Amino acid sequence: MKRLAKWQLISLFSVLVLMLSGCGEPFLSALKPAGEVADTQFDLMKLSTLIMVGVIIVVTIIFLIVMFRFRRKDESIPKQVEGSHTLEILWTVIPIILLLILAVPTVAATFKFADVTQMEKKNDGSEGKLVVNVRASLYWWEFEYPDLGIVTGQELVVPTDEKVYFNLKASDVKHSFWIPPAGGKMDTNVDNVNKFWLEFDSKKAEEANNLFYGKCAELCGPSHALMDFKVKAVSRAEFDQWVKDMQAVKEPAKADTALAQQGQEVFNNSCIGCHAVTPSNKTPEAARLAPNLTNFGERSRVAGILDHKKEEVKNWIRDPESYKPANKMTGTYGQLTEEQIDAVAEYLMGLKVQE
């Protein structure tokens, strides 16, 4: 039985190793940093790991030396060394030194990443002055660019190689904003606003096809694991063009096919009460009940988790509960016919602001 238990333990560790070997995608892994914050945090991880491994190696060597060199050979009592001031000083001073080696850069980095004085100044969204208000809801994300008059849902667009400042809050329960390749997570609370900044490296963004994955890192309900969003990290020129295109949208895009026109009519009668199809942030926050769909046709995912294609849009509209249990759209599905669902999906896939 003991041998069986050992083999079970070995099997468990083998499975864990195989699972961990799947980590490391540039768009999702904290082990592949893609910005200044992530680089510093990764360096601190390596430093702490090096210290811990070093301590383990030293202790193991001492243990082996003591076990073999001073193993008992007869009944004589070895020389007693309790009360040695030298040993007591060594095992007190060495840990203190190791803690200081880790603590000093950690504290310095913490204060650096907490410095958001720039966002307190008057900003206009230009280089180095971009502020994004992040609002987390069950189970979706809203990104408001207050200085640019733009609101988006589920996809965050940011320029590379410059700081982007974030105001984080939640509209219902506690969530946590996390873009693993860009930096550590930060909680979004209902009763206060957390602030921090991130920076996205252009070269690392290119390796990830300019698309990173963000997640909720705080257990918030049945669909917590499915509360994803996407981050498009593009050059400043591309970002400015995106801003210009979004600001040019003054009214919902007109459907260009008969089926899409039918879908737009159904959408206006059934969906417009919760979803907006213009990027303006003039609508009060309390009235923004669901993700903004202005550029839905340009997204990379449906509901943050499904492949971006018409069939998946229809699946989501038909039964969102089966994909994200307890989401706020639950209870509204089942009211449309298959023809209406097909028409709405056609309309949504045509909502684009850029060619």
Image (tube, helix red, strand yellow):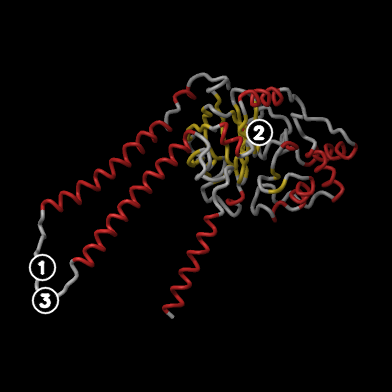
Q: Mark 3 points at which residue?
A: 75
The local crowd at label 2, few if under 14, some if 14 to 19, many if 20 or more residues have their Cα within 10 Å, is many
Question: Residue drawn 59% across and 55% down?
Answer: 222
Quadrant of the rendering where the C terminus is positioned: top right
The local crowd at label 3, few if under 14, some if 14 to 19, many if 20 or more residues have their Cα within 10 Å, is few
Q: Mark 2 points at which residue?
A: 152
Point out the residue furthest to the right here.
258
Q: Nearer the viewer, residue 144 or 328?
A: 144
The local crowd at label 1, few if under 14, some if 14 to 19, many if 20 or more residues have their Cα within 10 Å, is few
Q: Do the residues labelled 3 and 1 touch (CB within 8 Å)?
A: no
Quadrant of the rendering where the N terminus is positioned: bottom left
Quarter of the image where one finds residue 84: bottom left
Q: Are marks 3 and 2 in contact (CB under 8 Å)?
A: no
What amino acid is found at the position of numbered circle 1 in the picture?
A: Pro
Q: Which of marks 3 and 2 is nearer the N terminus?
A: 3
**Tag in front: 2 or 1:** 1
Q: Earlier in the sequence, mark 2 or mark 1?
A: 1
Position in image of residue 7 (x %, y %)? 47, 73
Question: Residue drawn 64% across and 26% down?
Answer: 239
Q: Which of 162 and 350 is in front in this view?
A: 162
Instruction: Determine which of the numbered discs, if any, sits on residue 159 in the image.
Output: none
Could you say whether the residue bearing mark 1 is in a helix, strand or loop?
A: loop
Q: Mark 1 points at which residue?
A: 78
Q: Are marks 2 and 1 in contact (CB under 8 Å)?
A: no
- Distance (Cα) linking label 3 and label 2: 80 Å
Quarter of the image where one finds residue 104: top left
Position in image of residue 114 (x %, y %)? 42, 32
What amino acid is found at the position of numbered circle 3 in the picture?
A: Glu
Could you say whether the residue bearing mark 2 is in a helix, strand or loop?
A: strand
